Image (cartoon, helix red, strand yellow):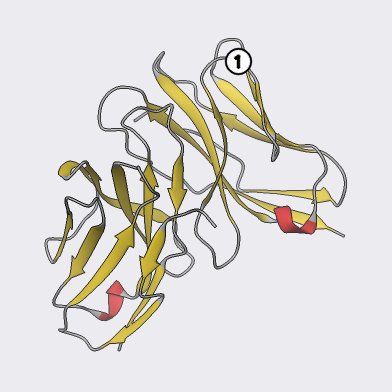
Amino acid sequence: DAKTTQPNSMESNEEEPVHLPCNHSTISGTDYIHWYRQLPSQGPEYVIHGLTSNVNNRMASLAIAEDRKSSTLILHRATLRDAAVYYCILRDQTGANNLFFGTGTRLTVIP
Amino acid sequence: DSGVTQTPKHLITATGQRVTLRCSPRSGDLSVYWYQQSLDQGLQFLIQYYNGEERAKGNILERFSAQQFPDLHSELNLSSLELGDSALYFCASSGGWGGSFEAFFGQGTRLTVV
């Protein structure tokens, strides 16, 4: 599985937008970009995923670079409930399709 | 609620014992994944099943084994338990094989080995 690189931690003020970056320079053409988050003492939670085009859902937006070597998860208005570890993961459309989690980005939301 | 059910929520057992963790995937999901998360550690992939067949293995110890049954629920068996096996164990499920399918996680089983 191709690897991803994320900052260890980020801070955001409450009610402001948050842009969480992820680099995946070795991404293959069949890799989907997935984002999950893990709140304290809970199981990981699916956030969003995409292949080539930008994606929006009720939780967030995913902006994918034209060359697909990086992506950004956008939380439009951070709330205290968004404080979590965010994981950017590549999932191959072919092959074993494991979900390998890296260290993720710990997001702190400041009231 | 993700729709993935894990039982039990908490388990306390002694070293050397054997335990079984159970996972019921979301209705219709064919793929099940198991993960281990030790205190302040990342999520370590253990094993994946798809429609009853083992598809991939991660860092799963030989003392651990798993299976997926015809009704698609899965069990993770941990034997000869050691103190270091104390961790949160998560199960996830997804609808299909490809990367276009998102995965949904249960709330985990907290295992404490004393």
Instruction: Identify the residue under disc 1.
Output: A53
Whether A82 is drawn above or below A76: the answer is below
User: Would you identify the image quadrant in which residue A59 lies?
Assistant: top right
Residue B41 can be seen, yes or no: yes
Q: In front here: B58 or B55?
A: B55
Q: Chain of mark 1?
A: A
Whether B103 is drawn above or below A97: the answer is below
Residue B37 can be seen, yes or no: no
Q: In front here: B71 or B30?
A: B71
Residue at (17% x, 45% y) in the render: B52
Residue at (54% x, 16% y) in the render: A68
Residue A30 horizontal/vertical position (percent): 39, 17
User: Would you identify the image quadrant in which residue A81 lies?
Assistant: bottom right
What amino acid is found at the position of numbered circle 1 in the picture?
Ser
Whether B38 is drawn above or below A52: the answer is below
Whether A91 is drawn above or below B77: the answer is above
- Give left or right: position of B56 versus B89: left
Residue A108 horizontal/vertical position (percent): 73, 55
- Give left or right: position of B79 versus B9: left
Residue A42 horizontal/vertical position (percent): 54, 63
